[in-house]
Image (cartoon, rainbow, N blue to C red):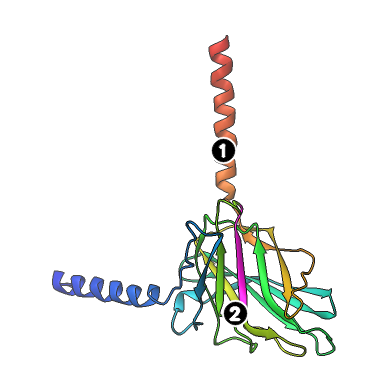
Amino acid sequence: MHVSSRSVVAGLMLAMGLLAQTTSHAVSLTEPVATPFADTVLPGTTVAVRPELAGTVLQDVLTPFSFNGVTGTVQNRVVRETSTGTLDFYWKVDVDANSVSEGVSAFRLVDFGYEYLTDADWRIDGLGSVAPTTGRLFNEASYPTGAINFLFDGVVTAGSASRFFFLHTDATSYALSAQYDLLTGGDQALSGAFSTFAPVPEPEAYGMAAVGLVLTGVMMRRRRA
């Protein structure tokens, strides 16, 4: 079968156009420069708008919380994208119906890192009703290990749940290496810290680093001999 060069070029242009349409919907978090943090409006998205988000759930963990009169669970997912093989990290806050406080107003994430982070948003096509419409990225000078807050549009009150919100990354490996806490509405009480998944360097990177250290040691011993 003969394929003309014109057909090949047209196909490439179409593919590039589709890629541009997909990536144009990604919301990169504004980086703070001379301020402690910078806020970014998160409009919400769907897998129809961003098909690269489709993938396989690798982890789906429910962690209960109880503080200052509010109880519930945080759902934490790790998804490997089918098209790219990279990882997306999801969270969802559910508040029990018997909670007596004003609910949860913010989700605060620390130790997530900046190296693999590409963008953030929340899922319109998922469960829950309260959207985290603001992503707050903290200055790396003050938080070198990475700190991001998701601020809800209102409060996740008793008997309600947030939408799934996520950090889109280009990482391919992860570990239970980050932490999060929750902030109530009204009195702004802070919960304790909970472990959560985050990107980590590739296992091969650790291996190559170890090989490098061994080779360096051998060379130093040879020089001394």
Q: Which residues are magenta?
A: 145-151
Q: Is residue 194 left or right of residue 212?
A: right
Q: CA distance from mark 2 to mark 1?
A: 39 Å
On residue 132, which mark appears? Answer: 2
Who's the residue at 59% across and 76% down the image? 165
Vertical order, 202 against 96 (above or below): above
* Magenta stretch: includes residue 156: no
Provide residue 216's location: percent of width, then percent of height: 55, 25
Who's the residue at 55% across and 76% down the image? 134
Q: Is residue 28 left or right of residue 163?
A: left
What amino acid is found at the position of numbered circle 1 in the picture?
Ala
Number of residues whose C-alpha sits closer than 10 Å to that of mark 2, classed few (under 14), some (14–19) or many (20 or more)? many
Provide residue 108's location: percent of width, then percent of height: 67, 68
When asked about the image quadrant of residue 154, the answer is bottom right
What amino acid is found at the position of numbered circle 2 in the picture?
Pro
Q: Quarter of the image containing the C terminus?
A: top right
User: Which residue is the extreme one toward the top?
Assistant: 225
Number of residues whose C-alpha sits closer than 10 Å to that of mark 1, classed few (under 14), some (14–19) or many (20 or more)? few
Who's the residue at 55% across and 14% down the image? 222
Q: Mark 2 falls on what kind of element?
A: loop
On residue 200, which mark appears? Answer: none
